[in-house]
Structure formats: C-alpha cells, structure tokens
Amino acid sequence: MNTQLYDVIIPLADENDGDRPSWEGRIRLEQALRLYWAGFASKIVMHGECYGLNIGYVNTLAEAQKRWALQRGVPRDAIITEELSRDTVGEAVFLHSEILAPNQWKSALIVSSDYHMRRVQYIFNHILGPEYHLGYIGASTEKSIKDSIHNHKTRDHEQESLAFFLANIGQRTKPGDHIAIMEDLLETHPYYAHLQGKGLVEKVKTFSEQ
C-alpha cells in the first residue's frame, strides 16, 4: 500500500557556493532529505538554471543540488532536475509544465527558508491552483538571516517581492490558469524572455486538453 503523502518533495534553490549549493541552500536540502527518508515522497525535484551570481559555474543550481543529495545516499532514480527556472515564480511554473503535468502528479511538498514561506505559499498556490494538493515546510535559517550580507534575503525584500507578484502575474491571471500564466511569464518576466518560441505554451496547452 502506498503510504506516501506527496508525489514529490521540492527544495527550492538558493545560489551556488562555487559548484555546490550555498549554506542556506544546504539547509533547505537537509530538510528535504529528512522528509524524503521519512517517506513523505519517493521523488525529489531539484530546480534551477545558472544565472545572476551563479553564471560561470560548471553546475546548474539543479545539478549542484543533485550531486549534493547523491553524495548523501539518495538514489539517482529518486532525483528529478528542472533547469529552466531562475526564481521562485519560475520554479512554480516549470514544476507544473516540466514535472507534475507530464507525470500526472497532483501533490507536492515544498521546502524553503522559513522567512521565504509566506511568499512561496502565495506564488505556488496561485500558479498551481486548487487542483493540486500542496504542503509547505520552512527550514530554520535564523543564523543565515543574521549573518547574510545579501539584501535580497531580508524580510523587507520578501514583502516587496510578494507585493510585486500580486500586482502582476497574481493580478493578471487566475489561479491554476496554466496557459495564461505561462504566456504571461514568457511575455513579461525578463528572466524568461529567451524561452519565447520554445514550445512551452504549446506544451501546457496539450496538458489542458487531456
């Protein structure tokens, strides 16, 4: 009998530290692995392309996370990588188009930093919509918040980023309208303009027709 609570566990990506996950990224991964070993899901999804501060590294964010997990005993066939996303919004959009919809999975347990979770919940609930069963676990990062020199890891930034999401994709699209959300992402988000014309909208339309 399948006793798993979710189809997949999703540790959201942070920046790389060289060619391995950052200190904070490893905290998220450690929490995700505890959930995996406890049997919450049989698959872990690693997200993230190389971009911004990560350009020039050998590994994508997803590949760095995968290698870290493999070194800690997670079976290779338990790890799925998604290497299109460049931020939290992209992680949610491409989780749907590249992972959940193709496999007909309907549930995910999302792990991120504790201070990040309010924004994560708004974004994932809106983008995936009510057809998906979502759980959320915040990994404790109080030390990383105090020690961080990166302003984008502050709670003020989280509030500003959430407000921006709600005023843009969150306002222009309905929850779970995957076609409109993908079109909006590619047309308006500067991180994803390079993906226009790559067949992503058409892919999502095929899932909607099934």
Image (tube, grey):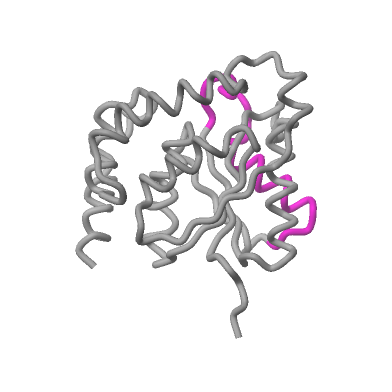
Question: In the displayed structure, would residue 34 be above or below residue 88?
Answer: below
Q: Residue at position x 74%, y 26% from top?
A: 144
Q: Residue at position x 36%, y 57% from top?
A: 130
Q: Is residue 68 magenta?
A: yes
Quadrant of image for the C terminus: bottom left
In the shown orientation, is residue 120 left or right of residue 143?
left
Question: In the displayed structure, would residue 68 be above or below residue 42?
Answer: above
Residue 196 in picture, x, y percent from top left = 26, 34
Residue 59 in picture, x, y percent from top left = 62, 35
Magenta residues, start to end: 50-75
> Quarter-wise, where is residue 123 in the image?
top left
> Quarter-wise, where is residue 186 in the image?
top left
Q: Residue at position x 61%, y 47% from top?
A: 111
Residue 70 in picture, x, y percent from top left = 73, 53
Question: In the displayed structure, would residue 94 be above or below residue 146?
Answer: below
Question: Relative to the observer, which residue lies in front, 108 or 174?
Answer: 174
Question: Relative to the observer, which residue lies in front, 15 or 66?
Answer: 15
Question: Relative to the observer, which residue lies in front, 108 or 195?
Answer: 108
